[in-house]
Amino acid sequence: MYMSDLDNRNIFSQHYENFSDGLYRHCFFRISNAEIAEDLVQETFLKFWKELHKGEIKNPKAWLYTAMRNSIIDYYRKKKTLSLDQKIDAGFDPENNDYVHTQITAEISLLMKKIEKLSETDREVVIMRYIDGLPVTEIAEIIESNENAVSVKLHRAVQKLKE
Amino acid sequence: MEHKNDKDIEKLFEAAQKIEMPEVAKRHIKLSILESVPIKAVKSPYVFQFRFIATFMLIIILFAGGGVSYAAEKTIPGDMLYPIKTKVNERIAGLLAFSKPAKTDWQGRLALRRLAEVERIAERRNMSVEEVLETHFAKQAERFAYQLEQIRESGETENLKRLESKFALAIAKHQSVIEKVERAMEKPEKTTNVLDRLAVLRKGGNTVEMSSSPTTDLYPAVMAVALEEESSQKDFLKQFTVELDIKEQYRATDVLDLTVFLANNTKNEKIITFNNGCQEFEVLINEYMRRTEPEILCTLAIVEIPVASGEIYKHQMTVDLNNYRTKIGENMLTLTFPWGVSETFSFEIIE
């Protein structure tokens, strides 16, 4: 289907308004860095914008989450990060850090510390389910797994969070 | 505080769901994508764009906040004006870095700005320099490394080399801090991360291999090249003039026609590379008064324009006011040029 530039702009704007905060939130909790989260959201939506010019995207939400997921994997691949524990040992305090914006409350910083202790795959599904609010079926599609496996992972991860 | 039951965890997730991307960043990202040139890659040397970001910052600061922003530049964490430095001055300057190389350059500059604060923080808080480096500097340097790595992977060797030599030179100015850290290398478990980050700035992104030999040997050659570039750029700036033509009154539905004249008074032809379009963002006038003003920031469209020696180039650009939140009364428009010249205009919106 032929889409004019104006159509693409409207589609882009609509999805940007719907999903940018969610993707940012997802990324923020995955990598514990507000500014890199902004960079990755920009990268993801730039890919989305280019993809729109190639043709229609069937499931934009899943597409965006998958693209964001790849950007995060890429991010981890390209660099070694300090774990939050190491940062805390070294004096990093998520509650009192200029780097992280002012929305960080004591609750959020506690959650960040807990999430940081999960394995990378557990963290991903927990954030998708309980912070992004994605249904299990969509999570399974994005991470290319099946619903049963996702449910098991979620159950296990939540138990760890409660520890 | 321990959260052991389901309700406590739910409460934490509810709090997390309220996190949103900062409004300024959200709008900036959207506009920068919509105003980018889709699909078609534009080859650009970016020379002016990232070399003079600091100049942008000073100019913009003068317009945006005057004395407060300027005074904030000398602060360190704990000072009352430090948030102005990091959240206003640096934020605005960061927004002006549109392209990947410009962004990378800005991240490198931020790392150097943090490095410049290290000794004073250590002194004030009675901490060791290496401790302060770890908490205050390493994360920013890490961000620079990430951006640099992306440039390396995209194969932009020209930009990579330029950034590498630039930061190798800049880091040399902080030799006293580096020496202190190197002396502390007897305790490698404490300093490895910091040294890795310093190595990033020195060597352009090589985070894995850290040479233990002094890197000062590298500097003289790099410095000579950089200084030569620096002085020819300054001469160039002096000889390049800009004039603009803008009316005093517009309607909120008008399309502004801006005419820009560029006169090349140098002896050689110059290729001018411009950035993209207009964007709207909030300028935080005073953090304590929480007063923000919308401002339209325009750069010129992405094109490469050869301007022969002695020639005047006339450039037309338009700003569709329908796209911005102009209000009746006085509005501000800032036009910046990739080589560091910036002009701000007041114009009146009439009914």
Image (spheres, rainbow, N blue to C red):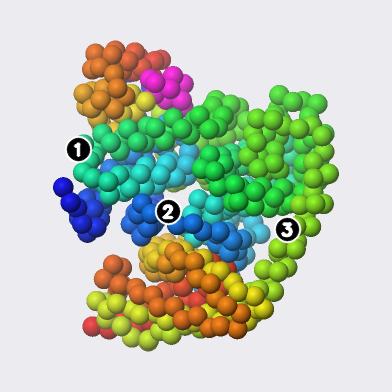
Report if the CB atoms under discs 2 and 3 are less than 8 Å apart: no
Mark 1 — residue?
Answer: A58
Q: Is residue B123 left or right of residue B42?
A: right
Chain ID at mark 2: B
Amino acid identity at mark 3: Ala
Residue B231 located within the stretch drawn in magenta = no
Give the quadrant of the C terminus of chain A: top left
Q: CA distance from mark 1 to mark 3?
A: 50 Å
Residue identifier under label 3: B226
Q: Main secondary structure of the magenta part?
A: helix
Q: Is residue B294 left or right of residue B201?
A: left
Residue type at numbered disc 1: Lys
Q: Under tag 3, what secondary structure?
A: helix
SS of the residue under disc 1: loop
Q: Which segment did they paint magenta?
A: A113-123
| SS at badge 2 | loop
Judge left or right: residue A60 versus residue B205: left
- Camera-nearest residue between B307 and A113: B307
| Numbered label attached to residue B45 | none
The amino acid marked with disc number 2 is Ala
Same chain assignment for discs 2 and 1: no
| Badge count | 3
User: Which residue is label 2 attached to?
Assistant: B41
* B219 or B72, nearer to the observer: B219
Q: Position of residue B117 (x, y in %)?
A: 68, 50
Q: Where is residue B105 drawn, in percent x and y? A: 59, 52
Left or right: residue A64 versus residue B275 is left
Residue A114 in magenta stretch: yes
Vertical placement of residue B270 versus B229, above or below: below
| Percent x, y of residue B83 | 54, 54
A112 and B351: which one is in front? B351
